[in-house]
Image (tube, coloured by chain):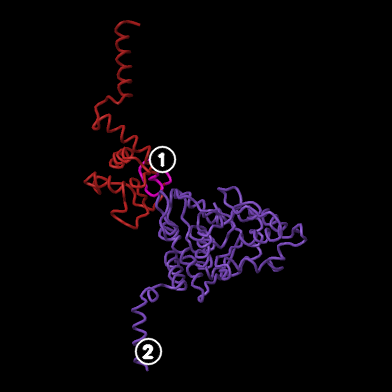
Amino acid sequence: MTIKNRLIATAASALVLGAMLGLAPAAVTADESSAVDAGKKLAFNRKKGNCLACHQIAGGKLAGNIGPPLVAMKARFPDKAKLRAQIFDPRKANPNTVMPPFGPHAILSDKEIDQIVEFIYTL
Amino acid sequence: MKKTATCLAVALSLALPSLAAQASPADDLKAFQNYFKKRFPDTPFDDFVNGVYAIDKGSREQWEAIEEFPPYEIDIEKGEKLWNMKFKNGKNFASCFGEDVGAIKPRYPHWDAKEGIVRTLEEDINACLKGNGEKPFKYKKGKIAQLSAYIAYKARGKTIDVKIPEDDPKALAAYEAGKHFFYAKRGQLNLSCADCHVYNAGNKIRADILSPALGHVSHFPVYRSKWGGLGTLHRRYGGCNKQVRAKPFKAQSKQYKQLEYFHTYMSNGLKFNGPGARK
């Protein structure tokens, strides 16, 4: 291979590698996007958030309809802390809710709730 | 005289507000059944014994296909053999329950005034075995379910008519305990029976439809595809409790017997249609 071609090949590989590592310019930081990914995994995990049991969520299949579909979340919860509070203990807003108290009943850890909030907030 | 009687009546109702305010089981029954009639106006009352298949057309077609070759048929045959088997002392189940098999299921559950407890069919099957020197069955599946299936099958079409004797406060207390259990939240997931089977009956949890509590017990014991076999009502109670991450009670525990007492009473007027096949 000529030096010129080798340089082109190296540059191309670097670009591909860079794209794979998400180093292309993005609106979220690497930390935030990893929280969103982690949050999505937790939300869809039956043993963790199990959100699809009751809520339609983009990207999820065979969702239940016991709770409202999770869309327009930023519009519905302009204050992200209120969304977190709702997931932490939904009984505060509605004492008769069937949504589990993920925080007080230790269904999810604080970190897991944070990550789920990051994911839900993108919907 | 009339004035005195009126004063007395007023005084009594003021002094005993709890008695005046407490709904009777009959009031509860009316409210419960009316709720489901309103929620599912297209479902004929008698059809509630078919659970989700009474409220969802798609799954009904699948279920009717399954019922053409009922998965519980062999269990009924085994149950009949159990019914006819002779104990070591020469007696059999008819010695305890009487010869008319079809008359057995409609007697359960009932209040035993002498012992002060609710009696269930499965409990009395084992009482019969123990009373005749035989080893009792396990309570959730296997022989108990097969014999119960045969007894249920012979009672198909008979009306559910659980009685809460008005003159026995302990019977009412057992009913109320069962009712409380049904409506109380429990488990890590903080759910009551009513949360799913009353307030969300007909809604979807993932891809499953929540069955209405009206008609819930009519078709037990049940062949569940999930179990790949037959199971008793208390087996299902335990499973449901586990599903909301609550520690289950034992089959034929006081809690589950009281729950069965309330739960069956709420289906009074419907017809037994066991054993049934469910997802």
Q: Amino acid at mark 2?
A: Ala
Depth check, front residue: A21 or A115: A115
| Residue plotted at (68% across, 66% down) | B97
What chain is tagged by disc 1? Answer: A
Q: Which mark is residue A45?
A: 1
* CA neighbours of label 2 inside 10 A, class few (<14), some (14 to 19), many (20+): few
- The percent position of residue A4, horizontal first and vertical second, equals 29, 8
Judge left or right: residue B183 versus residue A89.
right
Report the residue marked by disc 2. B5
Q: Quadrant of residue B89?
A: bottom right
Q: Amino acid at mark 1?
A: Asn
Viewer-proximal residue, B107 or B155?
B107
Q: Is residue A60 magenta?
A: yes
Q: Nearer the viewer, mark 2 or mark 1?
A: 2
Measuring 30% from the left and 5% from the top, which residue is drawn there?
A3
What span is in magenta? A50-62
Asked if residue B134 lies in the magenta stretch, the reply is no
Confirm or deny contact between disc 2 and disc 1 (CB under 8 A): no
- Local secondary structure at mark 2: helix
Relative height, residue B152 to residue B187 (above, below): below
Asked if residue A53 lies left or right of residue B129, the reply is left
- Name, please, the residue furthest toward the top: A2
